[in-house]
Image: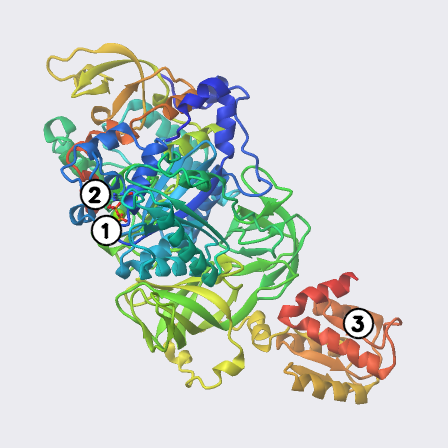
Amino acid sequence: MTNASEVLVRQSELEPGRAIKMGTFAPRRLNHLRALESESIHILREAAAEFARPVMLYSIGKDSSVMLRLAQKAFFPGRIPFPLLHVDTSYKFPEMIEFRDSYPRQIGAELIVHKNQEALDAGANPYSLGTQKCCGLLKTKSLLDALAEGAFDAAFGGARRDEEKSRAKERIYSFRDSLGQWNPKNQRPELWNIFNSRLDRGESIRVFPLSNWTELDVWLYIHAEQIPIVPLYFARERDVVFRNGSIVVIDSPAQLLPGEKTQRLKCRMRSLGCVPCTGAIRSDADTVPQIIAEMVSFRRSERENRAIDHDEEGSMELKKREGYF
Amino acid sequence: MISSAQNTAYEGFSAFLERNMNTDLLRFTTAGSVDDGKSTLIGRLLHDSKAVYEDQLASVKKSRINRSTGPVDFSLLTDGLRAEREQGITIDVAYRYFATPRRKFIIADAPGHEQYTRNMATGASTADLAVILIDGTKGLLPQTRRHAFIASLLGISNVLAAVNKMDLAEYREDAFHKLQDDFLALAAQLGIASVQCVPISALEGDNVVDRSRRMPWYHGPTLLEHLETVPLPERDSLQSFRFPVQTVIRPDATFRGFAGRIASGAIHPGDPLVALPSGRRTRVRSIVTYDGELPQASSSMSVTLQLDEEIDLSRGDMLVSPGRLPKVSRKFHASVVWLHGTPLELGRTYLVKHTARQTKIRALRIRHRVNVNTLAEEPATRLEMNEIGSVDFETHVPLFFDPYSSNRTMGSFILIDSATNATVGAGMIQESVAAVQLAEEPENEFAASGGPAIPVAPGERYARHGHFPGVVLLEGRSALAERLERFLFDVGLEVLHLSRSEFFGDAFVETVRVARAAGVIVLYSGGALSRETKDRIALEFDNRFLDVAGAPELPFDEEQAVRHVQAFARSLRFVDEQSRIQQKVN
Ligand SMILES: Nc1nc2c(ncn2[C@@H]2O[C@H](COP(=O)(O)OP(=O)(O)O)[C@@H](O)[C@H]2O)c(=O)[nH]1
Ligand SMILES: [Mg+2]
C-alpha cells in the first residue's frame, strides 16, 4: 500500500514535466479555470472574513483537495484561518485515512476528526442498517453534532452543482436552520457575488466555493496545479467482489458477505466514500491525464456509483433537507 | 461532459488538455414564459452537446412523468426539485454546466412566471448573455418585453432571442421574420447592444446544436454556434483600478497584505493608489499570490497587495487608482428589484451590502415604479415583491461606488432585513444624489437608530465637502486672498483664509494640520515662510499644495493668479482628481 508522503512523489514522477501551466493571466479574459479559481478564492475570503467560526468539511476526496488548495491560495502567505473537519464513519478506505493524517499536517492545516462513537458502540454499520440509516447516523448526525460541538457558524463544503439534479439550485451560501436543516423554499436569493452572511444564534451556513466547478474542471485543475490526491483514484489491481451491480473493493476478509469470493481487477475509484458503499470502476488510468482522457469518454455520472443516491428518486433532496450535504 | 471524446484520438492528448485548460467561460441566463420551452431547450442543449450522462438520461426515460409529445421529456433533465417535478414548473434558478471544444458554459435557468421576476434578476446578475425564448406561434407577449427589460436592467448587453416551436409554425419564414422585427424594435428601445434572433424547435432539435434542414431560408448561426462565437466583453484593464479590501493578511510582523478581487482596471508594482475613505496616497509594492509575485494583475483576479507605506486599511476599505476616483457618498439613486413578500418601506432602516462594506441604509423616496409589462413609470410609495423601482437611498457611512452601467461590482448592492436576515432587495446604483435634490427630506432620525458610534473618517468629511483639503500660499497678498476666499466659498468649497503674520514655522504647520483634518482648503496670506516649512506643508497635504508667490514660473499678474487658484481648487474636487494628476505630471 502506498503511504501518503509517497503520494506526493508519485504524482510528480508519473507526470514529469507534464503539467501544463494555465498562464497566470490571459491577455483578454481569464481562462475558465482561472476564472473559477478567482471566484472560489473570493468566496473563501468573504466567508472567512464574515463568519465568527468557520470550518472546512474535509472529505479527503478530490474536491476537498481542490478546495484545500484554493484555501491555501486565498490566505497566502498566511495560514488557513480555520480548521478542517473530517467526519469519520470508520468505514473509510485505509488509504484515505493515511492521506488525511499526513497531507493536511504537511501544509500546516489544523484537522479535527469526529466520529459518532455512540452509534458505533451501539453497533451501527452499513451491512445491517442499510445505507440510508447508516448514513443518517454515521454521517449526517455525526456532522451535525460536530458542527454544534465546535459552535461553527459556517462550514465550507466541496459540493458542486453539476453533481446531482437537486444541487443545481443550491446557493453558494446555503442557509441551515437551527436544526441544521435545509429548506429549499427558504433559501436567500443570491445576486452577483454578494453574499448575505447574517445569522441568528444556532443557525449556520454551508458555503460551497466549488459550486460552479464541473468534475472535468476539478481534474483539469488537479493536473494543472499538481495537487496530491489519494491513490485510490489511480487504477491498480485490487481485490474486489461484484455486489448488486457494483464493483466493491475488499480490504479485509471481514468485509466479505457470506458466499462472496474476491477476484483481482484493475480498477479505480471515481469518487471516494465508505468502503461498502463506494463502487470502483474498471480502468487503466493511473495518471491524472489518463483519468481526464477516460473521463471525457465517460457517459455515466460520477455519483452513479454511490448507493445512497439511488435509494429512491429524489433521495438526495430528502437527505439534504435533513442536513446531509 | 464534453463532446470531444472522439477528437482526442486525432488531435493528440496534450493538445486536447492544453485547449481545455484555456477555453474561456460564457455565463448565460435563460428567460421565457411558462411553457415557452426553456427547460426543453436546455435539456436539448445538454443532451446534444453530450453533457448528459447515460444514467441521468435513463432515469428520465423511465420517469412516470412525460409532458412532451416526444419519447423523451428533456425538461426533466433540468427541473430538479421534487415540488417542481410534481407541479411541472421551474420554481427557482437552476445552474447547469456544459462545454464544447470552444467554450465552457454556465447556464442560469430562470423561470418566467410573473411572480418570479426576482429569479430572472438573480440569473441575469452574473450573466454575460441572455437567451430569451419566444413562442413562435404566439408572437411577442408582454412577458417578452419584461424579460428583455430585466436583462437590460441587469446590464446584459448580449441577447439571443430564440424563436421556439417553429415546428408548430410549419417552419415558416414569415412567422419568424415578423417576430424578429418586433424583437429588434424592442431591443433598440431598451438599448441592448447586440441581438441575435434564431428560429428553433427545442423539441425537435432544429437549429439548437445542428442546423435545421427544415428552415433552409435561415442563414444565421444555430443557437449553439452563436453561444460559442459571440465576442465576450473584454477585460476592462483600461478602466480605473478598483480594489475592495476583503480581508487583511498578516501572518507575522513582517508581512501585511490586503486581499481582494480586482473589480476593474489593472495594476503593476509601483503604481500609485489612493486609499478610501482616508484619502491617503500610497503605492503598490508587490502583487502577492501563492503562485509567486505577479508583474501585473487585472480585473476579476483575486490577489493580495502589499503597499509601500504602512497605512491602516481594513475590510470594506478600498484601494483605487488616483486617476478617476469612485463616487464617495452617503446618498445615491438606484434601480431596485424587490425580492421579498414584505414590501420596501420608506424611512425604514435596512442593512446594505456593497462590495465588502456593510452598513445601515434607508430609502428616502421612490421616484417611480416601473410597470414591467408596459415599461411605463408609475408613482409609488412602496415596492412589492417582484416590483422594480427607482429609489433614493441614504446610508449610515459613505459607500464608494461607480454607476452599475460602467461596473457591475462597483454599482451593485443587496438589501437585508435586519430583523429576519432575509435578502429583501437588489440594487443597481445609477448616480449619487446631489444635496439640492434632497433638500425636502424629513428630519434625520438616523442617529437615534442605535448601534455603536462610528468615528468620522477624514474621507467622510472630504466626501461631504466634495473635495480634498489643500493649501494655497499667497504670502503677503491678503487683499487677493480675501477675494478668493469669498469666491471659493460661494461656489461651495470649505475654505479658510489665514492672514496673521505670527503664524510661522511649527505653529503654522500645526494650524494647517488641523485644517487638513477638517477637510478645509487654506488660503495663507501672512508673512514669508521658509523653504523647510513649505516642504513640510506640502508633505502634510499629500502635495495638494499651490505656492503662488514662491513659484517663479507663476505669474504675479492678479488675474492670472486667480485663474491658477481656481484651477487648483477645481482639481481638489473628487471628480477632477484626474486633471490634478495630469497637471502634476505636465
Ligand atoms: N411542439 C413543440 N413543443 C415544445 C417545444 N419546446 C417545448 N415544447 C413543449 O412545451 C411544453 C413546455 O415546455 P417546457 O420546456 O417545460 O417549458 P418551460 O416552462 O419554458 O420550461 C412541453 O410540453 C414541451 O414538450 C417545441 O419546440 N415544439
Ligand atoms: Mg421549465
Q: Say which element carries label 3.
A: helix
Query: Can you identify the residue that label 3 sits on?
Result: B534
Amino acid on which disc 2 is placed: Glu
Numbered tag placed on residue A184 in the rendering: 1
Left or right: B492 with respect to B339? right
Within-10-Å neighbours for mark 2: few <14, some 14–19, many 20+: many
Query: Of the residues shown, which amino acid type is indicated by label 3?
Result: Lys
Q: Quadrant of the N terminus of chain B?
A: top left
Which corner quadrant of the image does residue B310 belong to? Answer: bottom right
Indicate left or right for B326 with B46 as reference. Answer: right
Query: Which residue position is annotated with label 2?
Result: A317
Image mark 3: chain: B
Residue depicted at x 48% and y 34%: B102
Q: Quadrant of ligand 1?
A: top left
Percent position (x, y) of residue A166? 25, 42
Q: Say if labels 2 and 3 share a chain.
A: no
Position of residue B268 measured from the top left corner of the image (x, y, whole percent):
65, 48
Which three-letter amino acid code belongs to the residue tagged 1?
Answer: Pro
| Relative depth, front residue between B523 and A3 | B523
**Residue nearer the viewer, B487 or A156:** B487
- What separation in Å lies between label 2 and label 3 (alpha carbons)? 71 Å
Above-or-below relation of B229 to A61: below
Labels 1 & 3 near each other (Cβ < 8 A): no
- The answer to whether residue B490 is left or right of residue B59 is right
The residue shown at (46%, 28%) is: A223
Upstream in sequence: badge 2 or badge 1: 1
**Residue B552: quadrant of the picture:** bottom right
Q: CA distance from mark 2 to mark 1?
A: 9 Å
Does the CB distance between marks 2 and 1 fall below 8 Å? yes
Residue pictured at 28% horizontal, 52% vertical: B92
Q: Chain of mark 1?
A: A
